[in-house]
Image: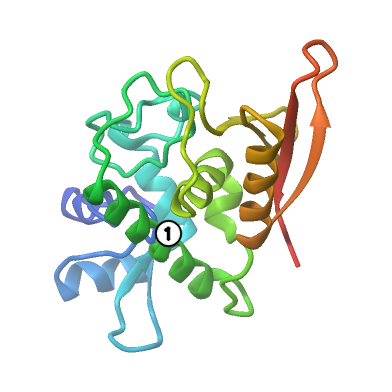
Amino acid sequence: MSRAPTAAQRRVIDDAEPVTGRLRGTPAQLAALVRRGLAFRHPRPPHDHFLTPAGHRIREATPAVAETASVAETPAGADTGVFAARVGGEAEAGADGPARVREVHSAWQGLLELRRMTNPDGTADRPCGWERTHLVRAAALALEAAGHRPAGPDTSGGYRVRATPQPEAVAVSAPDDGTLAACAATLEKAGWQTGAHTEPRTRARYLLASPRRR
């Protein structure tokens, strides 16, 4: 088993950009992370360094940003230091307005770049490995980046994304069929496949969405 990163290396890992995993550090620190398989140097200029899947796992094991089952319930405006797309139903919606729009746009562009870097064929039209391990966040980011409004604390008025027992699927609900259809169109354009379903007990309509592989 390889030894744990040094304190300095851990700081570099923890300070990586939330979605892309882009790293900032001294050349020696970055080279050490590459040698340990925790980072890679992008082949195209400006040859920035990014976390590998192993590096992401180390960062996510940090208590401050651990990806646990409860992370989807974390309010988007909570002071975690990590960008979080709004999944709907947050008790604290956080700041809206131009600043939030810029933040969401930046996160989405970063995710598209991550797709280009990590998908074997370099395509950005389908989800990457990070999205497959962060299904709720990834689907919510695609919806929010396209301008859809998340539901409020009472779950009304917008979309809501939740985990499901299925290994690679999330459930997306909306207040009406028109909004649900618009969410389906957005997710399909973002590289997800969707199917409409009806909850047997309540008869409520919802989508099952999963990342497209081809």
Tell me how many marks there are. Answer: 1
**Is residue 23 visible to the viewer in this orientation of the structure?**
yes
Q: With 78 as the anchor, is 179 left or right in this view?
A: right
Q: Is residue 193 above or below residue 134?
A: below
**Residue assigned mark 1:** 108
Snapshot quadrant of residue 177: top right
Looking at the picture, tell me which residue is in the foreground, 183 or 90: 183
Q: Is residue 56 above or below residue 71?
A: below
Outermost residue on the top side: it is 201
**Is residue 168 visible to the viewer in this orientation of the structure?**
no
Q: Tell me the crowding category of disc 1: few under 14, some 14 to 19, or many 20 or more residues within 10 angstroms, Cα based.
A: many
Looking at the picture, tell me which residue is in the foreground, 205 or 14: 205
Outermost residue on the right side: it is 200
Q: Secondary structure at mark 1?
A: helix
**Badge 1 amino acid:** Trp
Snapshot quadrant of residue 20: bottom left
- The percent position of residue 163, horizontal first and vertical second, equals 62, 30
* Residue depicted at x 35% and y 52%: 104
- The percent position of residue 75, horizontal first and vertical second, equals 35, 26
Snapshot quadrant of residue 179: top right
- The percent position of residue 157, horizontal first and vertical second, equals 51, 27
* Residue depicted at x 33% and y 28%: 93
Q: Quadrant of the C terminus?
A: bottom right
* Residue depicted at x 57% and y 79%: 122
- The percent position of residue 174, horizontal first and vertical second, equals 62, 31
* Residue depicted at x 48% and y 28%: 151
Q: With 136 as the anchor, is 27 left or right in this view?
A: left
Q: How is the image coloured?
A: rainbow
Q: Is residue 97 above or below residue 66?
A: below
Q: With 129 as the anchor, is 39 left or right in this view?
A: left
Q: With 104 as the anchor, is 112 left or right in this view?
A: right
Looking at the picture, tell me which residue is in the foreground, 64 or 10: 64
